[in-house]
Image (cartoon, rainbow, N blue to C red):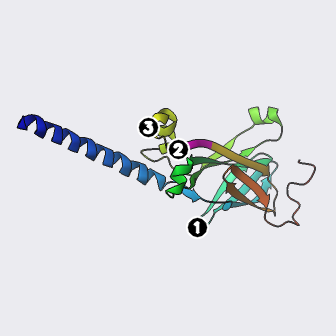
Amino acid sequence: MKTAVRSIAVLLGAVAIAAGAAISLVALNLHTYARLTYEQPVAELSFEARGPQHYLATLTRLPGHEVQTFELAGDEWQVDARVLKWHGWANLLGLDARYRLERVSGRYSDIEQERSAPRSVYALSKTPVLDLWSFAKAHPHWVPFIDGFYGSATYLPMQPGVRFRVTLTQSGLIARPVDSTAPAADDSWR
């Protein structure tokens, strides 16, 4: 009898340790995402023409102001992000939506050119060892506190001399010119 009780205690201890390790890995993975509580700026972009459909893009991450530069080909720029959204009860416990910028790329206005011209795409984050996004996608029943996970992207024309701000809302990415007098995203594009 004592052996059976001892075996059950060891088994329960092992389960508790495994559960603690899993919770720790999820918590560490959440730190690869930034917290989203309202519309907040996540990046600013500016462009310098280097030739026809060829630009030097400067991306500044917000709020940390980390600056990266990329050679982009095309007429338009695009920024993509991954978003994790929690169920309401998880929000009450302090789990606001989280995001991770994934990539920046150039794109062509003409679909045929998009299919055949040189592409330019750059990763903006590294995939962690345990990626909660991929795990939730593969095993949704194991993470019932996630209401949704989705990708979001925004794009506008690359225009030298114009600075764009990318913000993230609960519904996704939005891009706007920073200076309202700038000739960005004019009516001919819309």
Residues marked 2 and 3 touching at CB (< 8 Å): no
**Residue at the spot of label 2:** 146
Position in image of residue 43 (x %, y %)? 67, 60
Q: CA distance from mark 1 to mark 2?
A: 27 Å
Answer with left or right where residue 70 lies relative to residue 141: right
Position in image of residue 97 (x %, y %)? 58, 53
Of the image marks 1 and 3, the number of the one nearer the N terminus: 1
Residues marked 1 and 3 touching at CB (< 8 Å): no
- Give whichever of 165, 115 is nearer the camera: 165
In the image, which is nearer the foreground, mark 1 or mark 2?
Answer: 2
Picture residue at 89% right of the left edge, 60% below the top: 183
Span of residues in magenta: 145-150
Picture residue at 47% right of the left edge, 38% below the top: 135
- Give whichever of 127, 55 is nearer the camera: 127
Of the image marks 1 and 2, the number of the one nearer the N terminus: 1
**Residue at the spot of label 1:** 64
What's the magenta bit mostly, secondary-structure-wise?
strand
Rendered image: mark on residue 87? none
Reply yes or no: does residue 66 show up in magenta: no
Q: Amino acid at mark 2?
A: Ile
Picture residue at 37% right of the left edge, 49% below the top: 23
Image height check: is 179 above or below 111?
Answer: below
Residues marked 1 and 2 touching at CB (< 8 Å): no
**Residue at the spot of label 3:** 142
